[in-house]
Amino acid sequence: MNKRAIIWSSVAIAIVAAVLVVLATKHRLETSNQLITSRTYQIGQDLIAHSSSQQLAGLPPGLAGQLANLLGSPTRVSAVLLGDEPPPIGDGSACSRLILTNERAKGMELRLCSAPTSDKFRIMGYWPTSVNPGVR
């Protein structure tokens, strides 16, 4: 083989390798996002059914009382969002947000992150929300 063929072969192999790395990284990120989304949704279902979740490292003080008020009316998971709230509420540390709403148009949003030392999620913050029942 001459030098030119070796160079073109090397370039082609490098391009194919780069494309494979990009595709593998994209797949890993999509899989991670799907896992975060499904776990966040399950945490919401657990909170609705049991006012707690084994996937959480614990509840912050005051959240149990606010959940009890929210759950006084049939409640559902209305949204699971990836990423954090924009500042000043969020600081980029949350990996997902969970929004629960009930039939009285009351809701609660929770910021969640995966705890670095375990496979449980931690609640970074929460606040009540109001829902306009005419807007979906």
Image (tube, rainbow, N blue to C red):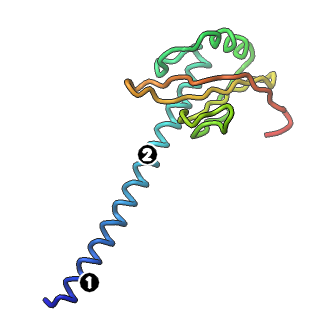
| Residue 27 in the figure: left or right of residue 37 | left
Q: Residue type at mark 2?
A: Thr
Residues at marks 2 and 1, CA–CA distance in whole angstroms: 35 Å
Indicate the position of residue 63 as horizontal and vertical percent values: 64, 13
Q: Quadrant of residue 68?
A: top right
Q: Residue at x 72, y 26 (%)?
A: 101
Q: Secondary structure at mark 1?
A: helix
- Say which residue label 1 marks: 8
- Say which residue label 2 marks: 31
Tell whether label 1 touches label 2 (CB within 8 Å): no
Total tally of numbered discs in the picture:
2
**Screen quadrant of the N terminus:** bottom left
Indicate the position of residue 96 as horizontal and vertical percent values: 56, 35
Q: Residue at x 17, y 88 (%)?
A: 3
Indicate the position of residue 92 as horizontal and vertical percent values: 57, 37
Q: Residue type at mark 1?
A: Trp
| Residue 16 in the figure: left or right of residue 37 | left
Q: Quadrant of residue 112?
A: top right
**Screen quadrant of the C terminus:** top right
Position of 63 relative to 24 (above/below): above
